[in-house]
């Protein structure tokens, strides 16, 4: 029988990095920037957190650790690293008016390389005396479940058995949704993404909105990388383990038709599709598993095609997505 | 909202087109600066002096005859993929699905080798392989194009997703055909008979690949700059509306161009599987589909200049590979160096298109 009680929490844990990535990318895309650097940024966020945690663990023995510091240091490092990446993207595409796709791809090359390089060489560079990066002590603080998780049976397993970053992801997604839909700033941000020329004429500082939205979006996405390595992977860094989740997050943005609150449920659906192959019995024909792994991508393509066919205005990508805006070249 | 408009520090004006040598001077300067930045990064991380680092890189990429051939082979394949994506980009169709199209072509080649290897005579097998890989790549490229042409479906995201569908398809067949069972790899196909292996010319394994791509480069140059179809591509890229006014069927141009783009990616898969690897796995494309986007863009879609830009990227990755081996660092080091260089070149385009001048007046609306 299909074991939902063990399936659902694993789907949720898969979904959290995707949700962070998708929320961040949605904010970014609402400003008209199609940031294909998100996969790289999530790597950078993850490895910066790891570097922070690594040095904290080197400096303080496990039993003297302060829970707040153990969480704050990796988080701040992660946010700082991903913010820098976001700023770099903006500097190149907004200030220097470079092509967004090319810049994004270059950032992904750089970011993935950055993550794998420091993941593989951190020990050698810092001269520390440990065999591999396994941040079990700090990761323990990240992965701490809610207090009632063990005693409430199936309810606890389904809803309470996650680290705090998982709940933060949901809060951020809801917050982003509220911001985009209900606040004045959110409205103006959407105007920038839909029709920058009109927004400009209305006195909105296009450049500033693009910078802020993209940088904040990158920071949110970076947290997804942090969750993956500190909570999901128990603080163990292995190169390329994060895989193509960054691209999947970009796919999720389409799937949610640019709505972060929809993202909460659909990321769990995606997470579920991502690991469904583990739960479907295939008998001896192991190769079928590989076809099941296609599902999230196929579903995304179907959604992409359907939304473009139905051509409903509220389901479309931001009108000026991926297009540069320079006042003089209107 | 803040209302206090201070005058911007700089004034940005669009240049009239720069003479080509000045534009290349700026790009050259950007590369030099980038190499300096790379040297600083390398020195900080390895403690080696920068000159020694570049000497290491140079020897890694071009140090021995074997390495030169390897570099040339890598160059040929990357160039091939870059040529493939170029017509699509000129049309402003963002084909980031090169990975998937290469895999589709490679998979077609591999399946012909496996299924028909002992059934067809050599020349016929090679022909069938070539036709199948071109068709597979073309199909993979045309699917997003048809939807783009008909319903304006976002092609960047569609082609991106097609990469992973192709990856899983390859993963599926790798397990179906794995030898020995349970190894998770296909192994060298037709090791004994060498059926479906591209012939070696003059004793050089890679020479045929290189020649094929060289011919392709010239053809693509003339296709884009001299043919009617190439002209239609540029018109659609400049403005779809103009294209419609002058009677170009935009949808047809989009699908036709993506058939071509995908087919050439398929060719790259054919060359990789039939010519060099003789096997297939999910990392066959190795990120080339993405790197090619940057190569093509850096070369401003000029096939001849693309030789240089792909050489730059191949040199960097092979050179950085040598550095990481020599200093016991992780191989991803090359990606960092490449990334830095790309940032500099991407940034430098601004100074080619625009002129900066310090603004004089204190209060002046931008």
Image: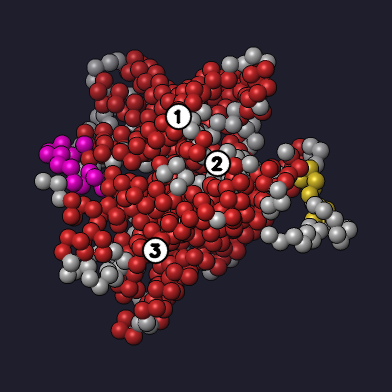
* Of labels 1 and 2, the one closer to you: 1
* Rendered location of residue B187, percent (x, y): 26, 37
The mark total stands at: 3
Q: Earlier in the sequence, mark 1 or mark 2?
A: 1
**Residue identified by numbered label 2:** A318
Q: Residue at x 45, y 47 (%)?
A: A259
Residue B292 visible in the current orientation: no
* Rendered location of residue A179, percent (x, y): 51, 56
**Residue identified by numbered label 3:** A168
Callout 2: few (<14), some (14-19), or many (20+) C-alpha neighbours within 10 Å? many
Can you name the residue that lies furthest to the bottom here?
A64
Callout 3: few (<14), some (14-19), or many (20+) C-alpha neighbours within 10 Å? some
Structural distance between the alpha carbons of marks 1 and 2: 16 Å
* Stretch of the chain drawn in magenta: A275-288
Question: Nearest the camera: A261 or B74?
Answer: A261
- Tag 2's secondary structure? loop
Question: Nearest the camera: A106 or A330?
Answer: A330
């Amino acid at each position: 029988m299909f074991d939902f009680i063990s399936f659902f929490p694993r789907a949720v844990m898969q979904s959290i990095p995707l949700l962070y990535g998708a929320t961040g990318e949605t904010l970014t895309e609402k400003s008209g920037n199609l940031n294909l650097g998100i996969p790289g940024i999530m790597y950078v966020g993850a490895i910066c957190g790891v570097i922070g945690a690594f040095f904290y663990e080197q400096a303080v023995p496990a039993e003297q650790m302060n829970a707040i510091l153990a969480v704050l240091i990796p988080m701040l490092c992660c946010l700082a690293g991903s913010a820098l990446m976001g700023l770099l993207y903006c500097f190149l595409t907004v200030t220097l008016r470079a092509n967004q796709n090319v810049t994004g791809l270059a950032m992904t090359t750089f970011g993935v390389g950055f993550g794998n390089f420091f993941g593989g060489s951190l020990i050698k560079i810092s001269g520390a005396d440990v065999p591999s990066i396994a941040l079990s002590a700090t990761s323990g603080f990240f992965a701490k479940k809610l207090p009632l998780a063990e005693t409430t049976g199936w309810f606890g397993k389904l809803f309470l058995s996650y680290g705090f970053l998982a709940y933060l992801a949901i809060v951020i997604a809801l917050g982003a949704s509220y911001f985009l839909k209900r606040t004045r700033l959110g409205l103006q941000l959407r105007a920038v993404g839909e029709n920058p020329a009109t927004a400009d004429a209305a006195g909105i500082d296009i450049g500033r909105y693009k910078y802020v939205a993209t940088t904040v979006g990158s920071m949110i996405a970076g947290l997804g990388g942090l969750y993956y390595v500190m909570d999901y992977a128990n603080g163990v860094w292995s190169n390329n383990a994060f895989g193509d989740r960054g691209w999947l997050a970009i796919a999720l943005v389409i799937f949610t038709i640019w709505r972060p609150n929809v993202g909460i449920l659909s990321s769990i659906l995606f997470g579920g599709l991502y690991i469904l192959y583990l739960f479907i019995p295939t008998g001896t024909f192991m190769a079928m598993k590989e076809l099941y792994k296609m599902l999230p991508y196929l579903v995304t393509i179907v959604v992409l095609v359907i939304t473009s066919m139905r051509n409903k205005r509220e389901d479309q990508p931001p009108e000026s997505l991926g297009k540069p805006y320079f006042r003089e070249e209107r | 909202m803040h209302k206090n408009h201070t005058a911007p520090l700089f004034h940005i004006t669009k240049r009239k087109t720069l003479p080509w040598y000045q534009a290349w001077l700026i790009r050259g300067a950007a590369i030099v600066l980038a190499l300096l930045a790379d040297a600083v990064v390398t020195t900080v991380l390895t403690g080696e002096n920068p000159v020694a680092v570049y000497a290491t890189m140079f020897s890694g990429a071009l140090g021995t005859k074997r390495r030169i051939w390897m570099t040339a082979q890598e160059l040929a394949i990357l160039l091939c993929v870059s040529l493939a994506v170029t017509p699509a980009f000129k049309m402003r169709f963002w084909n980031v699905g090169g990975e998937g199209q290469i895999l589709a072509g490679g998979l077609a080649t591999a399946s012909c080798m496996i299924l028909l290897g002992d059934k067809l005579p050599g020349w016929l097998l090679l022909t069938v392989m070539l036709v199948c890989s071109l068709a597979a790549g073309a199909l993979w490229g045309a699917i997003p194009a048809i939807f783009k042409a008909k319903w304006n479906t976002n092609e960047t995201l569609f082609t991106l997703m097609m990469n992973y569908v192709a990856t899983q398809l390859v993963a599926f067949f790798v397990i179906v055909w794995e030898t020995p069972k349970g190894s998770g790899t296909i192994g060298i196909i037709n090791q004994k008979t060498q059926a479906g292996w591209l012939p070696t010319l003059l004793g050089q394994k890679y020479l045929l690949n290189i020649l094929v791509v060289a011919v392709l480069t010239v053809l693509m140059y003339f296709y884009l700059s001299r043919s009617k179809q190439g002209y239609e591509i540029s018109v659609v890229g400049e403005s779809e509306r103009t294209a419609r006014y002058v009677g170009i069927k935009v949808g047809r141009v989009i699908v036709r161009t993506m058939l071509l783009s995908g087919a050439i990616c398929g060719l790259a898969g054919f060359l990789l599987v039939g010519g060099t690897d003789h096997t297939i796995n999910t990392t066959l494309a190795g990120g080339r589909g993405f790197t090619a986007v940057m190569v093509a863009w850096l070369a401003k879609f000029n096939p001849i200049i693309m030789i240089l830009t792909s050489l730059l990227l191949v040199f960097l990755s092979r050179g950085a590979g040598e550095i990481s081996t020599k200093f016991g660092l992780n191989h991803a080091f090359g990606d960092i160096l490449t990334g830095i260089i790309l940032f500099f070149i991407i940034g430098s385009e601004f100074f080619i298109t625009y002129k900066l001048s310090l603004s004089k007046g204190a209060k002046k609306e931008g």
